[in-house]
Amino acid sequence: MQQVLMTGAAGGIGTLLRPILPRLKVRMRLSDLADAIPQAEPGEDWMPGDLTNPADAARLVAGCDAILHFGGISTENRADLIHEVNVKGTYTLYEAARKAGVRRILFASSNHVIGFHPRETRLDADSEIRPDSMYGVSKAYGEALARYYWHKFGIESLILRIGSCFPQPKDRRMMATWMSKEDMLRLIGAMLFAPRLGCPVVYGVSNNRESWWDNSKTAYLGWVPQDSSEMFATKFADYVPNDPNDPAILYQGGNFAKAGHFED
Amino acid sequence: MQQVLMTGAAGGIGTLLRPILPRLKVRMRLSDLADAIPQAEPGEDWMPGDLTNPADAARLVAGCDAILHFGGISTENRADLIHEVNVKGTYTLYEAARKAGVRRILFASSNHVIGFHPRETRLDADSEIRPDSMYGVSKAYGEALARYYWHKFGIESLILRIGSCFPQPKDRRMMATWMSKEDMLRLIGAMLFAPRLGCPVVYGVSNNRESWWDNSKTAYLGWVPQDSSEMFATKFADYVPNDPNDPAILYQGGNFAKAGHFED
Amino acid sequence: MQQVLMTGAAGGIGTLLRPILPRLKVRMRLSDLADAIPQAEPGEDWMPGDLTNPADAARLVAGCDAILHFGGISTENRADLIHEVNVKGTYTLYEAARKAGVRRILFASSNHVIGFHPRETRLDADSEIRPDSMYGVSKAYGEALARYYWHKFGIESLILRIGSCFPQPKDRRMMATWMSKEDMLRLIGAMLFAPRLGCPVVYGVSNNRESWWDNSKTAYLGWVPQDSSEMFATKFADYVPNDPNDPAILYQGGNFAKAGHFED
Amino acid sequence: MQQVLMTGAAGGIGTLLRPILPRLKVRMRLSDLADAIPQAEPGEDWMPGDLTNPADAARLVAGCDAILHFGGISTENRADLIHEVNVKGTYTLYEAARKAGVRRILFASSNHVIGFHPRETRLDADSEIRPDSMYGVSKAYGEALARYYWHKFGIESLILRIGSCFPQPKDRRMMATWMSKEDMLRLIGAMLFAPRLGCPVVYGVSNNRESWWDNSKTAYLGWVPQDSSEMFATKFADYVPNDPNDPAILYQGGNFAKAGHFED
Amino acid sequence: MQQVLMTGAAGGIGTLLRPILPRLKVRMRLSDLADAIPQAEPGEDWMPGDLTNPADAARLVAGCDAILHFGGISTENRADLIHEVNVKGTYTLYEAARKAGVRRILFASSNHVIGFHPRETRLDADSEIRPDSMYGVSKAYGEALARYYWHKFGIESLILRIGSCFPQPKDRRMMATWMSKEDMLRLIGAMLFAPRLGCPVVYGVSNNRESWWDNSKTAYLGWVPQDSSEMFATKFADYVPNDPNDPAILYQGGNFAKAGHFED
Amino acid sequence: MQQVLMTGAAGGIGTLLRPILPRLKVRMRLSDLADAIPQAEPGEDWMPGDLTNPADAARLVAGCDAILHFGGISTENRADLIHEVNVKGTYTLYEAARKAGVRRILFASSNHVIGFHPRETRLDADSEIRPDSMYGVSKAYGEALARYYWHKFGIESLILRIGSCFPQPKDRRMMATWMSKEDMLRLIGAMLFAPRLGCPVVYGVSNNRESWWDNSKTAYLGWVPQDSSEMFATKFADYVPNDPNDPAILYQGGNFAKAGHFED
């Protein structure tokens, strides 16, 4: 593992991770759409590109041993845009990776793939797909695509159902779903250097007290999150009466489950 | 259940079903692309339309109580065509159904959604998605989409993972995967008239001796297949030595699992 | 197995079974409250008694090898009556049986013990208790009591969650829940003559096409129902549009799940 | 959550908890039978009442947001007393809560609901009910009742199968079953302030090394016990030869499983 | 599949099968110890040999496409004999098969591999090994050996846990465990001609009403037993009172579970 | 627990454990083949013996309360030697223990009993036996034997599937499989002093980050490993590119799964 590509590097998670990526001790190629790329920090290697363009995708993946694929639309949006970027774009990236001989990919999926499970249902890697949004549907497509490239071509993918990777929890729900950037970096390290990755589903979440997701089936990766949302508990200590059957409270997807159709 | 739309009615399964559809005692609107529509039989009601076109979709679903959605590309093909027809087209149909107030849909998925499971693994509605083709990936998208419309909008879908719905089995593998047209019609009847459908996954297969798929979780539908491939057993009685680790023998998807990428 | 007691013999199921009980070739003692007992048919042996009265219970069970306990309140009712009859009465019977050395009991429980499961959830002997009524709660008490007498005192009970044991299905829901009197008799025979009964949970239902309940875990009993509600299918063939989220449609308990509190 | 009722507050667990209840920062109404109520400590609010009396129950629950229901008979006893207090009394309390609009209840169940499982069987929320006593049977009734009020009326209950909540373990078995008062208080806090409680089964036990019960399915509550019986390990370090098939050693219920019928 | 070896062909099952083996339409080489071989019937091909002798084993398997390995000690016996014949002999046969390139073996295991499960526990291919005898322990060795040769060398084995393969049931227990010779032949046919066998565990039992074993996981083989012990039901119709906790009644192994150590 | 026998005490694990055995505070009889026994340390009690010799076995177990059975061949070897020592020898020891009334045995099994499971399959006590060597097959025999003596004679065994019990991990794979001698000693203590042991399967592994095996089903033993291979992480930090489908990387058994037959 010497050369790694990160797509969507100018997005929220990319921005959180950039300062600590050097700890991985790999050469990191950062990529995003040309007009999204920020001022490069010292030592950063940026390469612009549009993942829906096969030529761009080929250029980005050339010479890479692995890809951290965080690019794409990361919240609910118009269906046509989601289809263009998250369906066609993800396919284009995997196809470029296959042709270039890249063997290992982190696919940034989302908890919104399973957002219509009630909070009191404990999920693991085998839980039923229940998208709470067209965004979630597009991530289900990506997960299926990753499995196809694994079984057909032997390309290993870590399917990462990210909870809420922000500097800190923004609301009460994120006490359960928060993932620290440090735990994200630990997971990337585990994924890059595992002797065998396979094609596992991992929930991207820190070691929070409130917990909906069980990663024990992927303990072979050696990823043990070290952080916890508990350090932010006082922020959400006030009891807010709510309706337990409000979709935003009932379902794991929170407001995504409650929201109507984006385009209406 | 008075007015039902069948998409893809000029395709293989539609052609098999057309002569026996009147037994359902519903008004059936048959649809397909304009240039695919055959000569109408007496009593048939054909309406042409392109499901990737929202206006066409809206016209087709207008006034329907239910939809039998067999339209789309039904075998491996170029990824861009599959994305256009099976991803965008399926979304367009569901969106039209939602706007028109259609409450029940049969979504014709495929065994190629789970084609990379070994034959000796018994599958049921909760088995892991393992597409064996881009066609299978597109059906995984459709299944996720059906779940989304169920949980978000209450539109019921029967997700039907069809085995091999032909007049008779064409090869040794189809002794396990064959579904008779009569059993298909019985399933459509059960789906149309169930007091509650929900959003179940059903494997579309007759009561064959060799059996890979377990439908017991959906026994509430009352669908009990009556036919069996056994009547064709003599056609495949000669033993053909083969390599048990040949992907076409090892995996449920058969030649789909063995084939390389369509576009290569 | 020579002498068997049937409690509640003047109730609905008792009345259905009485004409065919002689096929079991055991001496049957029929019991019910004194003022409920009908004109005895030739060869019938009636003994009145109130199961909430320990002395009556002792008299009824004296000399019996087994008990078919159908006595009690069999539908929703005032909580105080249910507590008196179904809680105190069932305890009194089991206690009398223990003191008299009776080794085997059929406890007539009900599908209303699990009535709040959705229809599309397939249940078996290990499914979660979800009573849909105070009647159902009292049957959950009786099931727990039967288990206690089994593990503590070695008294074997067949816990029978009866669906709808009537001459024929009365509504669409009973197409799934109907149990013929012949299948009930077969089950009683299997229970009386099994080399070892243990303390199994069995769903009392014929071999209907629509099926919510899986009895495969108790196949060791050798009970294979032979009848099916299918013979009554034409009675309920007309499609009745309904709301799939109406509690009477959504839940297995039907109208019991929909009904409010009895006493309100 | 401003006003909370604790029933059975003069009992063993109530007495342990009273000094630390103020940490919950809610107004706590303490209740027990009139002649059991101790001298009130400063700031305590006692209200006597008999839970088998509907008028008393109504008075106790009036104005409460939640109830901690520890009242009732808490060990094996005469069946008629158990029926009166734990069956009728629990029903009376739930009915009062329903009429008063209380939305959340902690129901103090017991490990004796599952006491006839062998010690080497690991249990979780879905394990089979196997009461080891009439006391255990009455708690099975209460659990079924809580589920009924949840599914029918939306009243949330935490069903708490308490192990051994004492100042410290009293015998070797309690090294596995001990629950500290601090962990009990943490659980009450989690239960009172969870955004959604639902109707979970939780085993009330500290983080002991010897462990029979798995609470992972209810990790969504955020309750992580912090204490361990290990601090008392030296008390029980001497090896005592015993018969592994002695019911008190074989079964989780310990001496409850071994004891004969209370009334004999 | 042209040449097949049957070991132990002079034993009980071999003797039952010999007259109907020609239906398989393969050349069958029958083998047993020299002094056990009976008068050959017309068309039979007998070859004597001792499976504990590598030279004999090599001679027997030479030129064979598949082996039906019924040879060995088939009931409880002295441990040293069992080790010699069932451990060393089975290893010697598999090793000979490996060297000769035989690709498919039926290993005659026994229900006594799982004989210490209670009758009311339904078993399938994944149930825990619980031998009821040293005979059963030796069969557990053989099952492990078959798995080793499958995963290491790709030799397919059908691990057949035979119930009671006799002309008819000999006692009440065999109503559950009986396997007709016709169903055995059907299974051998399915095993010989399956496109892929793998290394499945199958319970060898007819379609009896009393059923302890679930073969649904191996339905891919297409073996559907057609006979039932029910035709012999009248032989065992008399009720024989027994102790449900007698090991011969409690456990699936029957008298094997009850018997003491063979050599004592 | 006063007198305990350790067999194979001169082997690798015995040598690691000897200096810390006194912490168990039992009288320990150390045994091995006469010519393997090292110079005794002060306080050590050595007794030579060959476990394949019944007289030796009887002498060794005389007067013992428990046995730690580490004797036997501990890696792949000639099949005849493995049969002699690990099959016949283990049987001889258990038989001696039975005759002498020993009630508790630790049977040193091995991860090579399940070595042909892929690394990303999480295993527990119920996982399928998949030996990766004749050594592993012999351990499967021993596990079956231990179960037989438990169910038939009530002799409790801890079946310990040891990972890699060395002073420190020797290669990358052992980061997942390593077990410290301290954790081994803790487990022996838990096993010797448990009120009831039963016949559990435990994976012998420290609390390593990379984890393939789940011991939660045996948490009743109170064994919580305290060490972790993480302290040796820097030794294996260099990334070594490898083929994820190399049997030594793909399977849990590592090189045992890759190796051919020992005797070839």
Image (cartoon, coloured by chain):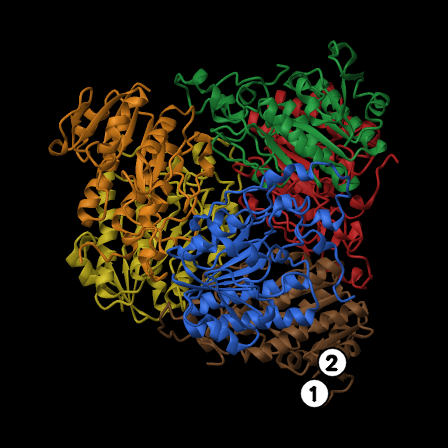
Chain colours: A blue, B brown, C red, D green, E yellow, F orange
- How far is the residue under mark 1 from the one under mark 2? 9 Å
Please name whichever residue, E33 or F80, is drawn nearer the observer in this view of the structure: F80
Q: Residue furthest left?
A: F35
Please name whichever residue, A39 or F106, is drawn nearer the observer in this view of the structure: A39
In the rendered structure, the residue with mark 2 lies on which chain?
B
Please name whichever residue, E228 or A157, is drawn nearer the observer in this view of the structure: A157
Horizontal side of B10 relative to A208 (left or right) equals right
Q: Amino acid at mark 1?
A: Ile
Quarter of the image where the N terminus of chain D is located = top right
Quarter of the image where the C terminus of chain D is located = top right
Position of residue A86 relative to residue D86, above or below, is: below
Q: Position of residue D186 (x, y in %)?
A: 63, 29
Q: Amino acid at mark 2?
A: Leu
* Image quadrant in which you'd find residue D155: top right
| Residue depicted at x 72% and y 39% | C131
Badge 1: residue crowd in 10 Å (few <14, some 14–19, many ≥20) = some
| Residue depicted at x 69% and y 18% | D18
* Image quadrant in which you'd find residue E38: bottom left
Question: Which mark identifies residue B37?
Answer: 1
Q: Secondary structure at mark 2?
A: strand
Q: Is residue C154 visible?
A: no
In the rendered structure, the residue with mark 1 lies on which chain?
B
Q: Is residue D224 visible?
A: yes
| Residue depicted at x 24% and y 28% | F18
Disc 1 and disc 2 in contact, CB within 8 angstroms? yes
Position of residue F134 relative to residue F69, above or below, is: below
Horizontal side of F199 relative to D2 (left or right) equals left
Question: Which mark identifies residue B30?
Answer: 2
